[in-house]
Amino acid sequence: ILLLLSVEFLKERFGWRTFWGILIAFAGAAVLIGQPWQSGSNNESIGILLIILAAFCDVIATIIIKPIVSRSNCYQVTTLHLFIGAAPIAIYALSYLPSVSLKTIGRSGLIAIIFNIIAIAFANALFYFGLKYRQVQNTGIFQYVNPVATFISAWIILGEVPNERLIA
């Protein structure tokens, strides 16, 4: 989708090498998505649909943001993006605010929140800086690194040992 939209709306040149790279990466992702789907669990199916919707929204956002990044400072775009993205979350979280205290979050929870904010800001700044100098369709291939990074991070940080169904 990213390749087709970037050619149509951003007038980027269609590259066969990029097309085949995205197609192979997508095939690998489809295999991973299809395994939990076959188990028939409603919760997993809803989760998969939400992740696919998030990926589609990411594609649309990348197409929209490319002309802005090309004319603007990457740090300004990152700041604007994070504030706009945080607004709906903050509004939603207001209803839960009375039940949250610093004692329930704890020191490790606060550290996790702070490090997540820093990591998200850093990742977005790097992405926008790279997007400024690359074609949008070429960023699609790099976005397939996310599942691998998530897989490794979940294993190391959260102790989520992968099962043979996920690996196979």
Image (spheres, rainbow, N blue to C red):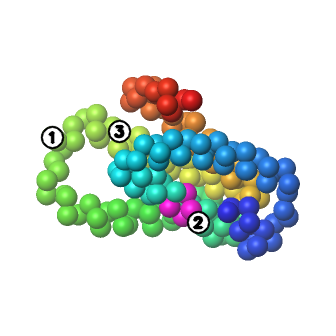
- The residue shown at (35%, 62%) is 89
Q: Is residue 81 above or below residue 102?
A: below
Judge by depth and name the residue closer to the eye, 167 or 11: 167
Q: Position of residue 18 (x, y in %)?
A: 80, 52
Residue 54 in magenta? yes
Where disc 2 sits, the SS reads: helix
Which residue is most to the bottom?
A: 9
Q: Residue at x 37, y 43 (%)?
A: 114
The quadrant in which the N terminus is found is bottom right
- Please state the extent of the stretch shown in magenta in the rendering: 53-57
Residue 38, percent from left and from top:
47, 45
Total marks placed? 3
Residue at image mark 2:
61
Amino acid type, residue under disc 1 in the picture: Lys
Mark 3: secondary structure: helix
Q: Is residue 133 above or below residue 106?
A: below
Q: Position of residue 23 (x, y in %)?
A: 73, 50
Along the line of sight, the residue nearer the viewer: 40 or 19: 40
Q: Secondary structure at mark 1?
A: helix
The amino acid type of the residue labelled 3 equals: Ala
What residue is shown at x 86% (from left), y 54% (from top)?
16
Q: CA distance from mark 1 to mark 3?
A: 15 Å
Checking the image for residue 103, the label placed there is 1
Q: CA distance from mark 3 to mark 2?
A: 27 Å
Q: Is residue 113 left or right of residue 118?
A: left
The three-letter amino acid code for the residue at tag 2 is Ala
Q: Which residue is mark 3?
A: 112
Ranked by sequence position, the earlier of labels 1 and 3 is 1
